[in-house]
Each structure stands twice: as C-alpha cells, then as structure tokens.
Image (cartoon, grey):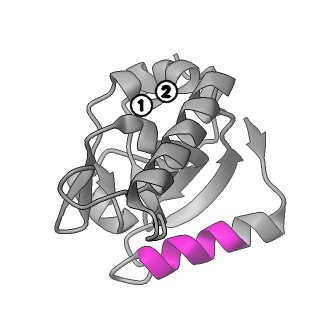
Amino acid sequence: MIRLVPNLVKFITTQWTNATSSQGELAEIAFVEQFNPARQTIENFERYRSAMEAKIAPNKLQTIIGYIVVPNEAIQTLINVGFSNLNSLFYRDPELLLIDHPEANRVFQVRIALGRPVEDYTELDGKIKLRDLRAAIVSFVLIVARPNQAVQYIPTNEIQ
C-alpha cells in the first residue's frame, strides 16, 4: 500500500464529497492509500469487463465508483483474492455506508462494472448487490475521521 500525493488525495476527496448526501458533514478523509490487488484479481476484473461489454453491445458498459467496509479479518482475503469469498454490498453514497457501519473508519473505494440491471446487479436505496463479484475491484483505501475523532494510520496490508 502506498500513501498518495496531495493532488490525487484532493481528487479522491472531491469524488467522496460529490457522492455524499450531506456534502461531507459526517466524516472526512484523513488518509488515502492506493490499493494494489493481486494480479489474478485485476485479470479477473478485466476479463469480466470485456465479457460484459460484449454482452451488452452496442450499449456502453457503465463503471461507477462505490464504497464498502470490509471487516479486519477479511482484509487479507480481499488483498489476496478480491471479493470472491466475501458477502459484499456496495454503496454509492459513502456517508450512508458510515451510517450503516458506525464503527468503521477504513472505507474501500471500488470500481464497479454494473452490467445489466436485474441480470447482473440489483440496487435499492443506493446499495448495490452484484451477482458476480468479479465486477468490482478496489482502487483506494480511505481512512476516515468523524468530527472530533482522531484516527491513527495503520497501513492496510499490516492489518491481520
């Protein structure tokens, strides 16, 4: 994991703020790490995207930014094999995610290839359930702080 340069952090913070319903009042980003998935995870995601683009042609595949909290005990699995073994619900609004997971301060920013509604994913109230988890891949890890809360930076790959 790599801590990022200020311009990229500003870009990710802007994405976060634009995705929130309250414009960042519930939490702010304290640290950002670039996530480096296993090579097999990257290849699986790209194969899935290619296959899905062929299925929905001539329509364009929509890839969105989503957010998820992963329990500490599942982080090494996520690093090594991606979402394949995790029961995952992705959120469009990161603050709704934090409301549903009040203990969380480590949020994963994810690229999601949506595919076809119903056949490939369902969405309700900004929460997305994928039929095939190869459609999602982590891009960044965001350490967030709520108002008046101090957070400590521990690199994600050091969490056991």
Does residue 155 sit above or below 147 in this rendering?
above
In this view, the residue in front, 58 or 125, is: 58
Q: Which residue is mark 2?
A: 78
Residue type, label 1: Phe
Determine crowd level at label 1: few under 14, some 14-19, many 20+ residues with C-alpha closer than 10 A. many
Location of residue 22 (image quadrant): bottom left
Predominant secondary structure, magenta span: helix
In magenta segment, residue 105: no
Q: Give x and y (percent) for residue 50.
A: 55, 47
Residue that appears at 46% across and 44% down: 136
Q: Give x and y (percent) for residue 128.
A: 26, 56
Residue that appears at 48% across and 44% down: 51
Q: Which residue is mark 1?
A: 83
Residue range highlighted in magenta: 11-19
Work out whether residue 150 can be spotted.
Answer: no
- Give left or right: position of 33 versus 146: right
Q: Indicate the secondary structure of the residue bearing disc 1.
A: helix
Residue type, label 2: Leu
- Give left or right: position of 97 versus 16: left
In this view, the residue in front, 28 or 123, is: 123
Q: Indicate the secondary structure of the residue bearing disc 2.
A: helix
Location of residue 69 (image quadrant): top left
Marks 2 and 1 sit apart, C-alpha to C-alpha, by 6 Å
Contact flag, marks 2 and 1 (Cβ < 8 Å) = yes
